[in-house]
Image (spheres, coloured by chain):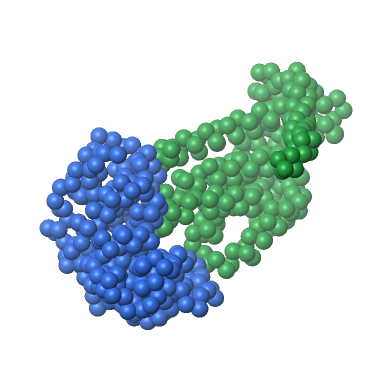
Amino acid sequence: MTSPTLSPPSFTADHHQPPSVRVENLSLRYGRKMAFANVDAQFRAGQITALIGPSGCGKTSFLSCLNRLHELTPKAQLSGQVYLNNCDTATIPLTPLRRQVGMLFQKPNPFPLSIYRNLAFPLKEHGICDRTLIHHIIETTLTDVGLWAEVKNRLKAPALSLSGGQQQRLCLARALALKPRVLLMDEPCSALDPLSSEVIEDLILRLKGTYTILIVTHNLGQASRIADDVAFFWVQHDVGQLVEFGPAKDIFAHPKDPLTAAYVSGRRG
Amino acid sequence: MVRRLAIPFGKEQGATLMVWLVALGITVLFLWLLSDVIWQGGQAINGAFLTQAPIKAGLEGGIAPILVSTGLVLGVCMGVSLPLGLGTALFLTEFSPQRSHQAIRLSLDILAGVPSIVFGLFGNAFFSKVLGLGFSILSGGLTLACMVLPILIRSIQVGLVNVPHEYRQAAAALGLSRLGTLKTLILPAALPGIAVGILLGIGRAIAETAALIFTSGYVDRMPTSLLDSGRVLSIHIFDLAMNIPGGEQNAYGTALVLVILLIVINTLVSWFAERFRQSKLQIL
């Protein structure tokens, strides 16, 4: 794999301050099954928070509540509040909310369109129709994710012809093109080879400060490398719970909860 | 030890042989039917058969007005049922609450199984009498549309449901409108399924006899408007074979035309659907 040439990020200049994300007494159930319950936390503005814990403890479900993507699941029922700064997300219409809160999925999911249209289609949908502006945004975001040099001569090629790592960077560019303020990432590296995943990890680090980032990861090494804060989820009585939340160095070096200690040391989980 | 683990040789081979035999049997049956129609009907077909009006109730002359009537009935049927079917399928898969689905799906499946003669009686009572359309191409086409709708809706629905969920998820996460997502991603991706629906619909409509006897009628004149009565190919075959002594030859000829028409329509629809999808999407 060719290593992408990284230039200084261009998205800092015309960007608002990222907001903090606060959840109050948040619970989600799918029909009778409780995914997670009573989560209270405040995720700091412009910082990277890693959500860790074993599979099935509600991390992904938790993430999907922050941009109300859980509403796609017919039986999902949410209680509690999510605030961006002090604005309740339930009161924000879906389109602007999801534009502000971008998301990256576990499996790269580019549209079955050309590389160019993967970025142009969402921009047009959000009312940006000026061709020169669209082209400018596409070039800068693709440069930001280190993909421009690799694809500039084949923008009309199918996005699905890219490698997995390139696809994931394209998806990141697609999210960044809409100028979000919060980024949710659901195990963005788990489907990638180690080299591609290192590239993504570097990118995430460079986005810090400009975006409030929440990242679900099963890779504790990754969490300790990139996260400022860590939220540790665990399943208790078949329900996901937020067991411990704090600065990454405390969670890894001096965990307060014995479950956290067991998990981060690799004894359980 | 190794021997005990191995699958018994004869059983595996026997099963394979059975599957092959069944497949072979079906192919032979189809080819037999087709070659019979081609053999018997080929002698009847020539330029005049396709361009002339029937003489002596079809014993002589051709099937030109019947071809036109068939095209018109099919046109009315698909023109009405396709937008309705597409709309309903879209409503069911993309917009309606999940709970109502079971009931709607059940009623569609039952409707799809209703014998065509029942649709014929309904069409006669409703379109011909209540709406006063009489025995006409319009009432025939509309009756067929009712008959085709359940099949059309179910297959388009299947096509839409089979579109990968990731497309919808990715689009929703980007805050894209449902309409834009539908137009750009979902509908093009569902096109093969929609084409199958159209083909099944056309197949059922073009072969229909019972429902049309009551609605579009027998008249073998060249139709001058949609309110004229018109005889379709399948009714012509039925009439020639059953009511006209010595009509078998031309019945076979008409049957061959019907089969060729079906094959041509099938090929065209699949080809256009695939081309259109490729022009909209870039799937590897």
* Image quarter (top left, top right, bottom left or bottom right) of the N terminus of chain A: top left
Residue A234 shows in the view: yes
* Image height of B3 relative to A49, above or below: above
Q: Position of residue A179 (x, y in %)?
A: 23, 58
Residue A89 shows in the view: no
Q: Nearer the viewer, residue A21 or A92?
A: A21
* Image quarter (top left, top right, bottom left or bottom right) of the C terminus of chain A: bottom left
Q: Is residue B93 left or right of residue A121?
A: right
* Image height of A135 relative to B21, above or below: below
At 31% from the left and 42% from the top, the residue drawn is A115
Q: Position of residue A57 (x, y in %)?
A: 44, 70
Residue furthest left as drawn: A13
Residue furthest right as drawn: B245
Q: Nearer the viewer, residue B190 or B72?
A: B190
> How many numbered discs?
0
Q: Which chain is green?
A: B
At 23% from the left and 43% from the top, the residue drawn is A4
Q: Position of residue B270 (x, y in %)?
A: 55, 36
Q: Nearer the viewer, residue A110 or A200?
A: A200
At 31% from the left and 37% from the top, the residue drawn is A156
Q: Nearer the viewer, residue B204 or A252?
A: A252
Residue furthest front as drawn: B1
Q: Position of residue B148 (x, y in %)?
A: 64, 48
* Image height of B226 relative to B112, above or below: above
At 37% from the left and 39% from the top, the residue drawn is A161
Q: Which chain is blue?
A: A
